[in-house]
Amino acid sequence: MSIEKQLNSLLGGVPDGISEGVALGTGLADGYDYFPSAIGQVVVAFNTEGVSSLGLEEDDFFARFEHYTGRRLIRAEAPTAWGRHIAAAIEAGTPGRVPVDFRSLTPFQADVLHQTARIPKGEVRAYGWVAREIGKPGAVRAVGSALARNPIPLMIPCHRVVRSDGHLGNYSLIGPHIKVQLLEHEGAVVPRSEARGKVGPPERSEGGRDPLA
């Protein structure tokens, strides 16, 4: 059975106008389901292309999704073809066998996220490393901006990218304390000041060197 047919068959009930199944199967809406993670239950959105977004319900997930994509979300079970792999992908911190939907991203942003997904669990890399690996060594700040727009944190492990000065930096999924929690869960070494919940000083260039590099 195709992914489109699976999505169409997952929902009963037909509201006024268009059915929810048709909305999902035609891409007018994304489905969403709940999955466990190291930071508690997360919401995962998906469509016929793959997983499109991941976040925390208390972090205005639904409103932000509709604002950025223009699509509504409909409660549904993830298609069997890859739904059973989503929890494993969240825990591993890499999509693995789960397809992802990066249609809303620029090619540069997609390159940043694909490279970030290669960082092993329990390890960290600097923003400058990501920039160099994608062949854009001067785009350190742009890498940071791309990671801030990561639509599927946890599965694309932007929490494993840190500043070159030893501070962890910011994290789009609520805040830096979540970044600390994830890295500690994975066994990564977290600076003592960061582990106490403190965040580093404002990022600034010293001696012409970008602290993110």
Image: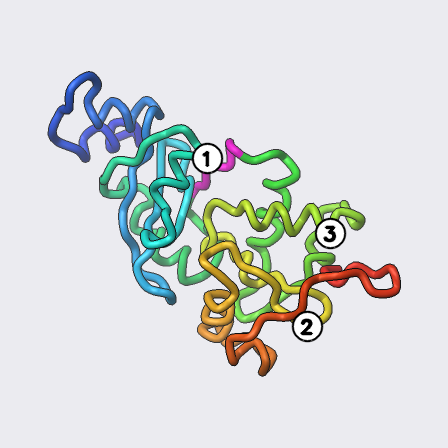
Label 1's element? helix
In terms of depth relative to the viewer, which is nearer, 156 or 174? 174
Q: Secondary structure at mark 2?
A: loop
Q: Is residue 90 left or right of residue 116?
A: left
State the mark number for residue 108. Answer: none
In percent of the image, x 72 and y 58: which residue is there? 129
Which residue is most to the right?
Answer: 207
Residue type (three-letter) at the residue carrying disc 2: Gly
Q: Main secondary structure of the magenta part?
A: loop
Residue 95 position in % (x across, y down): 46, 50
Residue tagged by mark 1? Answer: 68
Residue 166 disc label: 2
- Residue type at the position of mark 1: Tyr
- Front residue of 170 and 101: 170
Q: Residue at x 51, y 75 (%)?
A: 197
Residue 128 percent coordinates (x, y): 73, 57
Q: Quadrant of the N terminus?
A: top left
> What residue is shown at x 54% (from left), y 61% (from top)?
159
Per the model, the C-alpha gap separating discs 1 and 2 is 32 Å
Amino acid at pointer 3? Val
Residue projecting furthest to the left: 13
Asked if residue 131 is positioned above or below residue 185 in the image, the reply reads: above
Q: Can residue 11 be found in the magenta stretch? A: no
**In the image, which residues are magenta?**
99-104
Quadrant of the snapshot with the C terminus? bottom right
Q: What crowding class fits label 2: few (fewer than 14 Cα within 10 Å), some (14-19), or many (20 or more)?
A: some
Whether residue 103 appears in magenta in the rendering, the answer is yes
Q: Nearer the viewer, mark 3 or mark 1?
A: 1
Q: Earlier in the sequence, mark 3 or mark 1?
A: 1
| Of the two numbered discs 1 and 2 in the rendering, the one whose residue sits closer to the viewer | 1
Q: How many marks?
A: 3
